Image: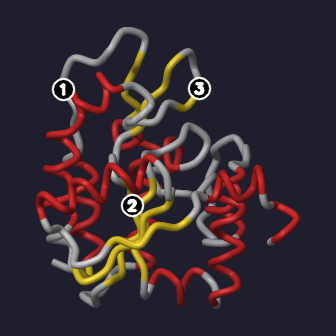
Amino acid sequence: MNLAEKINDFNQSLKLDISLPDGIEVMNPFENKTASKLASTFYRKYYSDSNPRILILGINPGRLGGGVTGIPFTDPVKLETNCEIQNDLPKKTEPSAGFIYDVIEAYGGPGKFYSKFLIHAVCPLGFKKDGINYNYYDDKELEKAVNPFIIGSLNKILTLNVDTNFCFCLGNGKNFKFLNSLNNSYSFFNEVAPLPHPRWIVQYRRKRY
């Protein structure tokens, strides 16, 4: 089984059947047939090999990017224009996806970038509250509730032929603090390197990039 099929199997297996704090709902893009099909197409296009990848972990899927396409930091526009995967999703853009694909294009394009890197998330399922994005660490009760799910998911991600010597963490605040603490306890990686989150860069440092 090549890497694409392993990733697709992992994504399809994602379930979160636990009690969550009031008002918070799970966002699982792989329960949607369209997102599931698009994600499968994407991974088969870029990961149909057995070569190792360097892992980049974001926070959790957002409702305008990975939450609708099933692909981290990839909104319907970038999926079509940059990855050349046609889709009928509403062409709404996500600021973080815009920055990530600027980086990808500067690296040499999706083919070259995804041959070296795999982007996923510390918590591979997303959340919404009052119709907007909600991060797993925004509520201590939620963070505690999803902790076993995150640990189990990270252990599964490590079976996807990723380089365990090194991992990038997108989000050098709470996301890094949480992941680094887990890594100190479970030794997933030899080193976790924090990077500013794309949303922070777009919101506060747009003129610099």
Look at mark 3 in the image and give the residue it sits on. Answer: 132
**Colouring scheme, one of rainbow, by chain, secondary structure, one colour:** secondary structure
At mark 2, the secondary structure is strand
Residue 120, label in figure: 2
**Rendered location of residue 189, percent (x, y):** 22, 73
Residue found at x 72% / y 73%: 102
Q: Report which quarter residue 166 is drawn in.
A: bottom left
Whether 169 is drawn above or below 77: the answer is: below
Q: Earlier in the sequence, mark 3 or mark 1?
A: 1
Q: Nearer the viewer, residue 196 or 111?
A: 196
Q: Does residue 58 appear to the left or right of 158 in the view shown?
A: right
Quarter of the image with the C terminus is: bottom right
Q: Nearer the viewer, residue 48 or 143?
A: 143
Distance from Cα at disc 2 to Cα at disc 1 = 21 Å
Q: Amino acid at mark 2?
A: His
Q: Earlier in the sequence, mark 2 or mark 1?
A: 1
Residue found at x 22% / y 28%: 145
Distance from Cα at disc 3 to Cα at disc 2 = 20 Å
Q: Does residue 172 appear to the left or right of 51 in the view shown?
A: right
Q: Amino acid at mark 3?
A: Ile
